[in-house]
Image (spheres, helix red, strand yellow):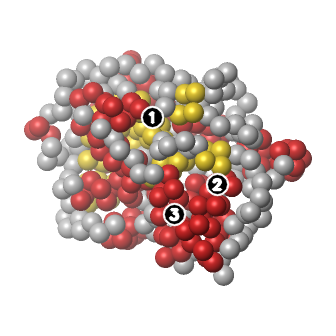
């Protein structure tokens, strides 16, 4: 589905134009905004509320980035057209990071699929109409490797089948990315697209709001996971996701391409607990020490919708080939253990561990 972009490279006349980051107050968004500012860019960010703007500015300060007058914040929501034309006007590039993510499982899949897909198209249309050169979109490994293959090995040519019996989030990320590639193929009018497909995103928090992945670390430190399900996942540091976004923004070879973002081999929940125990000592005294039997997880999942999402992943150790980002863009991610440890240290530093 990805297709080669129409441009042969970046336009140096655009380098002083603003760069837009959607979902600027999120875990990835705040790191990306900070990185762009540290690199000297003029940055715009969209958030959904004044409170989110405050969170973003505090996160930027925590990252050591002094924006001066180089950061403008726009209020825009993926579910409405308002604000997107103004946010994209005059921008050279757009990083589409924002994605709806409910606190729990939605009653109907479309509650998540529709805003993710339609919001992505809303951003792409605004970018095209504003003459933006390229959009870099944060998708997910769930859009790549959640339709199981016999080999259980995955690269950027693989796609999750949205018709499979996956959770709503997986379907939403898959359909939103497919819609983005379809748009670029049929309606882009010269707009280029590059997509980043990360596995679990860890790394230091810049504020007190936790993502799904970083919440796992807090849950373990709090002692709320006495035993661990036998589930494996990929790890990538949020700072490396931001770095890959920046590389894909301007590299000529990134246009029309997907890039898996994962560092090293898959690790298990229990591996994560051991890493925390090894590096945080007494602070990690409550992390799980043993794995839960698969049949126990399946039984508990019958009444617990959060566990239901893990059942199909029990014991599965996919192989994620992220060589393309390294070979094409020169990307060099941190070690997974460092990402987990830095996540934990930031959670402790922010006072988020339950007493």
Q: In this view, does 111 lie to the left or right of 211?
A: right
Dot 2 surroundings within 10 Å: few (below 14), some, or many (20 or more)?
some
Instruction: Between residue 24 and residue 72, name the one nearer to us.
Output: 24
Please say if 294 is above or below 149: below
Q: Is residue 254 left or right of residue 212?
A: left
Quarter-wise, where is residue 314 in the image?
top right
Q: Is mark 3 on a helix, strand or loop?
A: helix
Q: Residue 341 bears which disc, if any? A: 3
Point out residue 244 in the picture as x, y percentages from the top left corner.
35, 43
Residue highlighted by disc 2? 271
Q: Is residue 135 left or right of residue 121?
A: left
How many numbered discs sit on the rendered protein? Answer: 3
Is the C terminus in the top left, top right, bottom left or bottom right quadrant?
bottom right
Inter-mark Cα distance, 2 to 3: 12 Å
Q: Is mark 2 on a helix, strand or loop?
A: helix
Mark earlier in primary sequence (2, 1):
2
Mark earlier in primary sequence (3, 1):
1
Q: Are marks 3 and 1 in contact (CB under 8 Å)?
A: no
- Mark toward the viewer: 2 or 1: 2
Point out residue 180 in the picture as x, y percentages from the top left corner.
44, 29
Please say if 346 is above or below 10: below
Q: Can residue 124 be seen in the rendering of this structure?
A: no
Residue positioned most to the left? 13
Dot 3 surroundings within 10 Å: few (below 14), some, or many (20 or more)?
many
Dot 1 surroundings within 10 Å: few (below 14), some, or many (20 or more)?
many
Q: Can residue 324 be seen in the rendering of this structure?
A: yes
Q: Do the residues labelled 2 and 3 touch (CB within 8 Å)?
A: no
Is the N terminus in the top left, top right, bottom left or bottom right quadrant?
top left
Residue drawn at x 29%, y 22% is: 5
Residue highlighted by disc 1? 322
């Amino acid at each position: 589905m990805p297709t080669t972009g129409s441009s042969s490279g970046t336009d140096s006349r655009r380098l002083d134009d603003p760069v837009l980051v959607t979902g600027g107050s999120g875990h990835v968004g705040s790191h990306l905004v900070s990185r762009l500012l540290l690199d000297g860019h003029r940055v715009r960010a969209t958030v959904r509320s004044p409170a989110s703007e405050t969170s973003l500015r505090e996160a930027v300060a925590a990252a050591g980035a002094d924006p001066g007058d180089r950061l403008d914040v726009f209020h825009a929501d993926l579910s409405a057209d308002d604000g997107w034309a103004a946010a994209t006007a005059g921008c050279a590039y757009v990083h589409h990071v924002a994605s709806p993510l409910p606190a729990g499982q939605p009653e109907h899949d479309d509650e998540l699929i529709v805003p993710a897909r339609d919001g992505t198209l809303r951003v792409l249309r605004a970018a095209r109409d504003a003459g933006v050169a390229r959009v870099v979109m944060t998708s997910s490994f769930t859009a790549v490797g959640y339709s199981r293959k016999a080999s259980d090995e995955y690269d950027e040519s693989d796609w999750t089948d949205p018709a499979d019996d996956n959770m709503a989030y997986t379907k939403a990320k898959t359909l939103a990315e497919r819609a983005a590639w379809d748009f670029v193929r049929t309606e882009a009018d010269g707009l280029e697209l590059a997509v980043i497909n990360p596995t679990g995103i860890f790394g230091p928090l810049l504020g007190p709001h936790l993502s799904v992945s970083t919440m796992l670390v807090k849950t373990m430190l709090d002692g709320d996971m006495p035993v661990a399900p036998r589930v494996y996942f990929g790890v990538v540091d949020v700072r490396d996701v931001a770095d890959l976004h920046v590389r894909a923004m301007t590299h000529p070879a990134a246009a029309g391409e997907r890039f898996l973002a994962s560092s090293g081999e898959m690790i298990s929940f229990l591996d994560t607990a051991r890493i925390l125990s090894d590096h945080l000592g007494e602070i990690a005294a409550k992390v799980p020490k043993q794995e839960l039997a698969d049949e126990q997880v399946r039984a508990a999942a019958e009444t617990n919708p959060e566990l239901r999402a893990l059942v199909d992943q029990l014991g599965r150790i996919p192989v994620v080939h992220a060589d393309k980002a390294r070979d094409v863009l020169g990307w060099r991610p941190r070690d997974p253990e460092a990402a987990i440890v830095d996540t934990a240290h930031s959670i402790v530093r922010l006072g988020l561990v339950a007493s």
